[in-house]
């Protein structure tokens, strides 16, 4: 059981939905406007939170690790952050 008293996410989509609800709007906007090359800068902030709170470091959530296709928590958090970034970018208004 997580610190949120709800089951830990077991898929990347579930982890992204959790982040959508937890990350403040101002940070979501900042992340959405990052380039893909800038995403590694999130590793020690958001990435660390993902690893520590979603059961990747302490190995209490092996299903999420497997769902990312990675074998190490660092890589797994990167997959989740990239998916989160993609979801945020998909919500940006399109200019025609």
Image (cartoon, grey):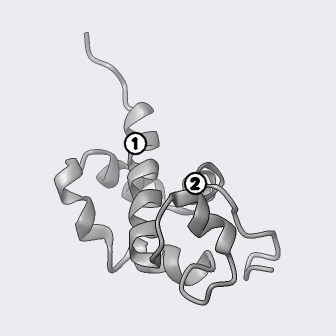
Q: Nearer the viewer, mark 1 or mark 2?
A: 2
Instruction: Quadrant for the C terminus, please.
Output: top left
Q: Quadrant of the N terminus?
A: bottom right
Residue visible at 31% across and 69% down?
Answer: 42
Give the residue at x 43% y 58%: 79
Q: Residues within 10 Å of mark 1 (few under 14, many from 20)?
A: some
The alpha-carbon separation of the residues under discs 1 and 2 comes to 12 Å
Which residue is at 62% across, 65% downward?
64
Residue drawn at x 40%, y 42% is 86
Q: Which mark is residue 12?
A: 2
User: Please, is residue 51 above or below residue 35 in the view?
Assistant: below
Q: Where's residue 35, x and y in %?
A: 20, 48
Position above or below: 25 against 74: above
Which residue lies most toward the top here? 96
Of mark 1 and mark 2, the one earlier in the sequence is 2
At label 2, counting other C-alpha atoms closer than 10 Å, the crowd grade (few under 14, some 14-19, many 20 or more) is many
75 left or right of 61? left
Where is 96 relative to 30, above or below?
above
Provide residue 40's location: percent of width, then percent of height.
Answer: 25, 66
Residue 2 locus on image (x, y percent): 74, 79
Label placed on residue 86 = 1
């Amino acid at each position: 059981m997580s610190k949120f008293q709800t089951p830990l996410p077991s898929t990347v989509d579930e982890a992204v939905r959790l982040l959508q609800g937890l990350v403040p709007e101002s940070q979501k906007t900042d992340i959405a406007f990052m380039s893909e090359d800038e995403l590694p800068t999130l590793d020690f902030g958001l990435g660390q939170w993902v690893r520590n709170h979603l059961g990747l470091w302490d190995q209490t959530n092996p299903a999420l690790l497997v769902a990312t296709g990675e074998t190490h928590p660092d890589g797994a958090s990167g997959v989740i952050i990239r998916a989160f970034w993609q979801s945020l970018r998909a919500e940006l208004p399109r200019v025609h």
